[in-house]
Amino acid sequence: MVVLQIACFLYCFLNRIKRKRFSMLDLSVISFYLCLFISTVMVSRDFFSWLTYSLQGAGAIFLIEDMMANDEKESILVIRNVSFFFLLCNLASVIMAPAGFFGDLYFLGARIGFTPFCIMAVVSALLGDYIVNGKKISITSGAVILAAVVNVAAVRVSTGILGLALLACMTAAGLLLCGIRKQSMVYLLSYGIPSLVWFVIVLKGRTDIFQIILSIVGEDLTFNGRTLIWEMALRYISEKPFWGYGVTALGDFYIAAYIKQRSLPAHDELLNLLYQGGVAAFICWNILYFVVGHALKRCRENYIIVLMSAAVFSFLCIMITEIQSQKAIIFMVIALAYQLAVNHSMETKEHV
């Protein structure tokens, strides 16, 4: 798998060098992983984990950009069909082994892997309807949505329930704004204000809204619900706040060098990011995020602005629960949002 990732990354990267063209998204993701590389050199020196980690993210962005730039309609259908197939395979594994194989493992891996695939499948299905058929939703999309909901509900994946609920609410609210003719206003309401809300949640630790949603399934998502994990993570982050400790264990948050336990997942991708790359990587991550926002601002299709804003926002929110959001799927969604915005820009010949 790593060999295939390297081959895909090198092909896309060398193709960009040959064309002498790197998009702002390309430069942003390269800067992000360079920051993590510096952190890894300084502390963890786990270069294999950094390589795997960076190939997943940067390779996903390069591949999706190239696919969508060459043939948008065919590419989005391929992404939809593959995502739907994986969801059906995972649903079959859930039915055959509700408790999982070999210790909580399903077709998509651990339960934490359900959420990104479900969001990706739903988004690609809705995009396929809109771009190919000019519809907002079809029977195929309905089947994909149903499969996604059943996947997360069958084994009570709280992040999946939260992610799909946020995606549905944000998309529904955004569609009510589509009657507005000014794209800038739709962008502000669909992307700008949710971004501000996310930063308030992150900076102020306000997880009340998530707690209300997840209390329905009996989950505890308050910041003091996992006090030991978060307090320990924050303590080590405060000791190396700027560069962090580097990438370890394929991107997961491990502090085995400091405690007797073998590993301690942070259940919070934001803390994972700050632990691995410190403030430097966090700044690069936000630059990456705002590059996508700038592209969406210039998009002439309100529906694309709304749907992709909802998808990115739902991923950002579940970053502060436990999902490993910096891996391939979140970057696929980011690349989809960016390249769709470029393809449907108000100035179609200008690359954002």
Image (cartoon, helix red, strand yellow):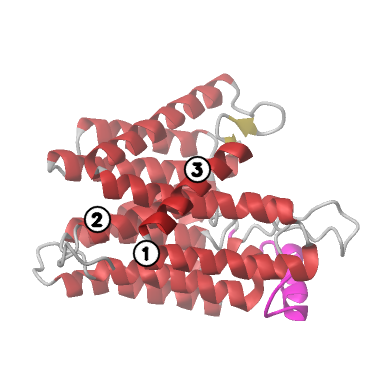
How many C-alpha atoms fall within 10 Å of the one at disc 1: few (<14), some, or many (≥20)? some
Mark 1 or 3, nearer chain start = 3
Residue that sits furthest to the front in the current view: 18
Magenta-colored stretch includes residue 228: yes
Amino acid bearing label 2: Ala
3 vs 2, front mark:
3
Amino acid bearing label 1: Ser
Given residues 55 and 144, the one toward you in this image is 55
Q: What's drawn in magenta, residue-wise? A: 221-245
Residue 180 visible somewhere in the drawing: yes
Mark 3 or 2, nearer chain start = 3
Label 1 secondary element: loop
Quarter of the view holding residue 94: top right
At a point 28% along the width and 36% down the height, the residue shown is 77
Tag of residue 8: 3
Q: Which residue is mark 1?
A: 23
Quarter of the view holding residue 246: bottom right
Q: Quadrant of the N terminus?
A: top right
Given residues 325 and 143, the one toward you in this image is 325
At a point 61% along the width and 70% down the height, the residue shown is 35
Contact? badges 1 and 3 (CB < 8 Å): no
Measured Cα–Cα span from mark 1 to mark 3: 18 Å
Q: Is residue 32 above or below residue 148?
A: below
- Tell me: 123 left or right of 107: left
Residue that sits furthest to the top in the current view: 96
Where residue 63 appears, as percent x and y from the top left, is: 42, 47
Magenta-colored stretch includes residue 55: no
Q: Quadrant of the C terminus?
A: bottom left
